[in-house]
Amino acid sequence: HRILSQEKETNDTHTQKLIMVIFASSYLPKDSDKTVREYKYKGISDGITYKKFYTHFCDYLVQFCPKWLAPNVLTTLGFLCLLIPNIILWRNYTNNLTGYVPSWLCFTSAFGHFAYIILDNCDGKQARRTGSSSPLGMIFDHQCDAVGTGLIMLNLGTVCQFGFNWMGYSIWAVVMVSFFFHNIEEYFTGCLWIREFGSDEGNTLIVTVYTISGLFGCDIWLTPLYKDIPANQILIVGFIIAAIIGSKDNICEALEVGKISILVFLYHSWSFAVVIGCLYHSLHKFDHIMPECGVAVLGIFSFLVAKIILRIQIAHICRGPFPIYNVPSLTVIGLWMICIERNIGNPYVVSNCFAILSFLMWFDCFYTTSNDFMRALNIKFWTIKNHSN
């Protein structure tokens, strides 16, 4: 009985340690309340479409928003506009980045994405208009962008008929890499700088792609355009080139303003590079499970990358140490790869279980951090404190 009792205590201890590795009671540095209260967001948007259209259109629309309406409500509505077309696509048509997509769903995706762009710009304007800008609103906005990026790429990949191959991987990776480098630049410089061809231009292109697909059908992206090269391959190459140029600007700005060396920058990026490398390896080595499990696999990586980016945002707001190692995220990815490699369980069930775990890890980090921010700032999530009519 003593031996069994000791073994049970040992197993319980190991389980508790594993849970503590994956989840945490707080993700903020110690005694960071003062830093959170003093934080002021700094951002520059030089986007062409933003300056020419979006900012003026959103300035006009936000006038009709009641001053009691919290900016986070607008952010949530924008995120739902992204989420709903994806759910319809996965549940009723296809979930392997290829196959039939009806025209009405392409138009719905175009409208939903356009609404997301508008609401994503309106929430910040509403926050400034009501004097309710806060670090809480910033991380919620950016996390909807981070999680939404994974959703966008799954939907866009299907509409463009990429499939789970180098194109399907690349469309997800280039956008996540761009988002990561924007956040790491913000950490070192203290400012989020959206350049001339930035997120609004990319989002406008995505709306255009959805609209073209609705008008002419998704098969148009399989049409050869140059020397038998289909349109979708030319499109993805364009995305890759734009991501490389944008990432180069992010790196150069971080090195110059942050006064760091390229080795320091690479050292701070290594765990993210490992995540991207693991996904690339998985899509090749486990290609046999991708038609059935691809969405779940991208879900695993999307939520874990979103958590890594959230940790960077927390470090930026709190002026805390950069989260270099990201042990929980790498642990989960490693465990999933071991299960698939050794055929432990049904791949579909295993992948979906790990996708749920990844979501819970991200949600735990976001929920815990949001509560810490609300406590430090004495504010609510869905309402504006002491709003005036």
Image: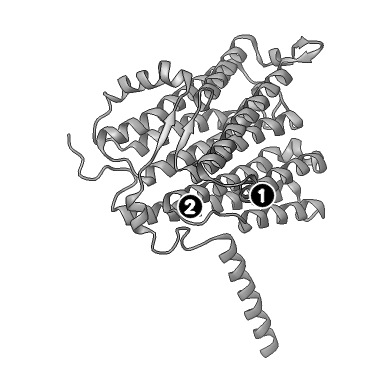
Q: Position of residue 218 (x, y in %)?
A: 67, 16
- Kindly identify the residue that appears in the image at 55 percent across and 24 percent down: 202
Q: Position of residue 193 (x, y in %)?
A: 47, 33
Total number of numbered discs in the rendering: 2
Q: Nearer the viewer, residue 123 or 351?
A: 123
Residue underneath mark 2: 315
What number is the disc on residue 270? 1
Task: Specify the quadrant that holds the C terminus.
Answer: top left
Q: Nearer the viewer, residue 283 or 247?
A: 247
Marks 1 and 2 sit apart, C-alpha to C-alpha, by: 17 Å
Say which label, 1 or 2, has the lower sequence index.
1
What number is the disc on residue 292? none
* Residue 175 picture quarter: top right
Q: Position of residue 108 (x, y in %)?
A: 52, 20
Which amino acid, mark 1? Answer: Trp
Q: How is the image coloured?
A: one colour
Please tell me whether mark 1 sits on a helix, a strand or a loop. helix
Q: Nearer the viewer, residue 14 or 348?
A: 14
Q: Is residue 53 above or below residue 128?
A: above
Q: Nearer the viewer, residue 84 or 181?
A: 181
Q: Position of residue 49 (x, y in %)?
A: 46, 18
Left or right: 243 in relation to 85: right
